[in-house]
Image: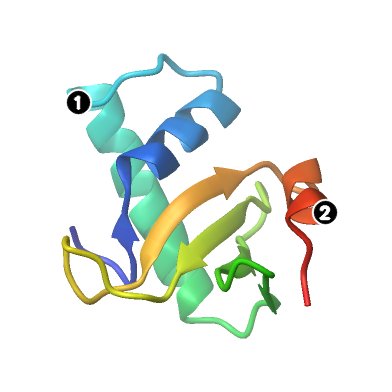
Amino acid sequence: MKGPWYITVRAVRDYLAIQHRPDVTDGPIFERATTELIGMATETAGSSREVKLMQSGALLFKGPRPLRLRFVVTPAPRQEGDAPQLVNVWPAGGAEAHREGMQ
């Protein structure tokens, strides 16, 4: 996948749920959501947006307007490749960020 981060299936499913779209793991709806996330990831990673280090070691990025989603990115390489992994997408101001605890 193109973009600064490897987009995981979990992240796409999170995004689909936030957008109130069907929970699918392939096909045109999934592909469109993936393309949208790649665009937001590219914009987010290439900007000076706020980044926080979470206790888990993941990075929490604040996404672009108007959605202002939160992107949880693990910097450690995985078997899919060396790129950081977008593992979760949370709604703006989601309680998950507070439960996860940031340093």
Residue type pointed to by label 2: His
Label 2 Cα neighbours within 10 Å, binned few <14 / some 14-19 / many ≥20 = few
Residue 26 circle label: 1
In this rendering, position of residue 19 left or right of residue 101: left
Residue type pointed to by label 1: Asp
Q: Secondary structure at mark 2?
A: helix
Tag in front: 2 or 1? 2
In this rendering, position of residue 43 left or right of residue 30: right
Residue at image position (29%, 24%) is 29
Q: Is 61 drawn above or below residue 35 in the view shown?
A: below
Residue 80 circle label: none
Give the residue pinned by disc 2. 98
x, y (%) of residue 6?
28, 61
Screen quadrant of the N terminus: bottom left
x, y (%) of residue 74?
45, 68
In this rendering, position of residue 28 left or right of residue 54: left
x, y (%) of residue 17?
53, 25
Q: Is 29 drawn above or below residue 5 in the view shown?
A: above
Q: Secondary structure at mark 1?
A: loop
Q: CA distance from mark 2 to mark 1?
A: 31 Å
